[in-house]
Image (cartoon, rainbow, N blue to C red):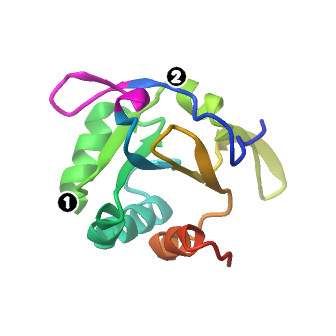
Amino acid sequence: MEYLNAGDKAPDFSFNAENGDSVSLSDFTGKKVILYFYPKDDTPGCTAEACNLRDNYSELTGRGYEIIGISPDDDNSHSKFRNKYKLPFKLVADPDKSILKKYGAWGVKKMYGKEYEGVLRTTYIINEKGIIEKVIPKVDTKAHSEQILKELEGTSL
């Protein structure tokens, strides 16, 4: 699976909002979006990443960004995770992995010499026109917001 690249149109997808309404990425046209893919709710790395984004939420939204997290977990898992850690952003359930696959965030991983398929932790920064501006394929879970802010300022780690 290959990642999408800066300059690519972000593939549209739909999801259910917390209130049950159907929402699409295209509904965010005119807004900037930080779209991050993560493996599993309430695990150490994913919790560190989500809490880091939560702790810097006002900085990111102050720059005009909406944050959307996507994992294969279901809506019930997302609701518990969001409530437990007081996450102020949207979490999208993708149990069939269709969104993950569209974004190249599902593929072969290796652990202890064994290969398996899983979520490739990735973040896409999308502009107001729905174009991917930046791709972060190597996420620092404990300092992800700082990583994003450096990318927004045009520097890399």
Q: Circles 2 and 1: CB distance less than 8 Å?
A: no
- Drawn side of residue 47 relative to residue 112, left or right: left
Residue type (three-letter) at the residue carrying disc 1: Lys
The N terminus lies in which quarter of the figure?
A: top right
Horizontal and vertical percent for residue 115?
80, 44
Secondary structure category for the residue under label 1: loop
Quarter of the figure with residue 90: top left
When the figure is inspected, residue 46 is found, relative to residue 2, above or below; the finding is below
At horizontal 46% and vertical 48% (from top left) the residue drawn is: 40
Horizontal and vertical percent for residue 86?
20, 60
Horizontal and vertical percent for residue 88?
23, 55
Q: What stretch of residues is rendered in magenta?
A: 15-27
Q: Which residue is mark 2?
A: 96
Is disc 2 surrounded by few (<14), some (14 to 19) or many (20+) residues within 10 Å? few
Quarter of the figure with residue 9: top right
Horizontal and vertical percent for residue 146?
49, 76
At horizontal 23% and vertical 46% (from top left) the residue drawn is: 80
The foreground one among 77 and 18 is: 18
When the figure is inspected, residue 33 is found, relative to residue 150, above or below; the finding is above
* Residue 21 is one of the magenta-drawn residues: yes
The foreground one among 54 and 124 is: 124
Secondary structure category for the residue under label 2: loop
Asked if one can make out residue 127 in the rendered structure from this viewpoint, the answer is yes
* Residue 11 is one of the magenta-drawn residues: no
At horizontal 56% and vertical 74% (from top left) the residue drawn is: 153
Q: Which mark is residue 42?
A: none
Of the numbered discs 2 and 1, the one sitting upstream in the chain is 1
